[in-house]
Amino acid sequence: MCWLTLFNEFCPQESVASLKFGNRAQKVKNHAVCNEDKDEQALLSSYKSEIEQLRDQLANVRCDLRSQWLSLTMAQASQADALEMERLQRASAQAHEEKHVIVNELVKQQQAVRVKQLYHNEQGITRAIG
């Protein structure tokens, strides 16, 4: 805060100096800090609470990491299960195809046996008649 008067015509330098001082004083910023002298017991108590907070943070981080690891492990297991299921389906399809081929061969063999039996029966009838 600066006070100027218009009656100070005889010392204009003093008025200018007062204005400059007011300008500098306006730019000053104060930051109040309360000085605390903590006793050893208070310091020990604050350190213990800080340690507890850090332990809680560490436990939360460990829990998050464990959860992420379990999720990743389950995803890998699911992927492995899916691959195993696909492999089993392919094996089942291949076994079904092989079974189909074997059944067709057996049907052909049975038909050949029936044809031979019919042929032999016909030969026997022809001999008996002739």
Image (tube, rainbow, N blue to C red):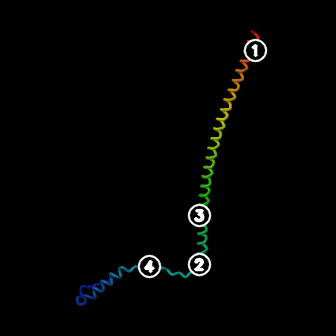
To which residue does mark 3 refer?
61
Circle 1: residue type: Gly
Q: Are marks 4 and 2 in contact (CB under 8 Å)?
A: no
Q: Nearer the viewer, mark 2 or mark 1?
A: 1
Circle 3 — which element? helix
Circle 3: residue type: Val
Give me the residue at 73% from left, 20% from top: 117
Q: How would you rate the neighbour count of disc 4 (Cα within 10 Å): few for under 14, some for 14-19, many for 20 or more? A: few
The CA span between labels 2 and 1 is 119 Å
Q: Nearer the viewer, residue 53 or 2?
A: 53
To which residue does mark 1 refer?
124
Query: From what the image shows, is residue 64 above or below residue 105?
Result: below
Give me the residue at 63% from left, 41% from top: 90
Circle 2: residue type: Leu
Earlier sequence position, callout 4 versus callout 3: 4
To which residue does mark 4 refer?
31
